[in-house]
Amino acid sequence: MKQELASRALNIAIAVNQCLFVLLTLGTANPDEAPSAAAWRLEGEGRLTGRLFRPAIDWVFVRLPFGWAEADHCRKAYESERLRNHLPKAYRNAQ
């Protein structure tokens, strides 16, 4: 039960995060891309927004309490998006 509630809370946090990202970019962001993944991708493309936000996001995630801290958060978010880890299993290998 506790694990299910934590999973639901994470799903809600991700949905709110992605919605706010799309709103802040006035609809130019991909609604399915996490801001952390976008920051990594944009920095890799040499874009100023990525160079500014990726270090800031990673700085925040390194300092999270309660065992939530994560080094290289943006890179991991980007890899997760690229590997489609966020999709339900039924969609991951669908042709």
Image: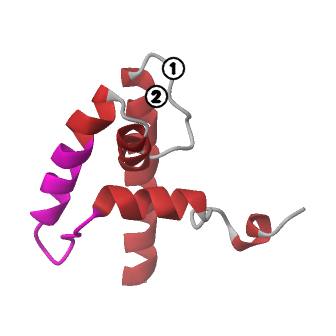
Q: Foreground: 58 or 13?
A: 58
**Residue name at image x 44 percent, y 44 percent:** 41
Disc 2 target residue? 22
**Residue name at image x 58 percent, y 67 percent:** 85
- Secondary structure under the numbered disc 2 in the rendered image: helix
Task: Write the start and end of the magenta stretch as one range.
Answer: 54-72
| Circle number at residue 94 | none
Locate residue 16, reporting x and y percent. Answer: 40, 42
Callout 2 amino acid? Val
Q: Quadrant of residue 20?
A: top left
**Residue 75 part of the magenta-drawn span:** no
**Residue name at image x 37 percent, y 59 percent:** 75
Q: Quadrant of residue 3?
A: bottom left
Locate residue 22, reporting x and y percent. Answer: 46, 28
Mark earlier in primary sequence (2, 1): 2
Q: Foreground: 60 or 14?
A: 60
Cα distance in 3D space between marks 2 and 1? 5 Å
| Circle number at residue 27 | 1
Q: Quadrant of residue 87?
A: bottom right
**Residue name at image x 37 percent, y 72 percent:** 6
- Secondary structure under the numbered disc 1 in the rendered image: loop
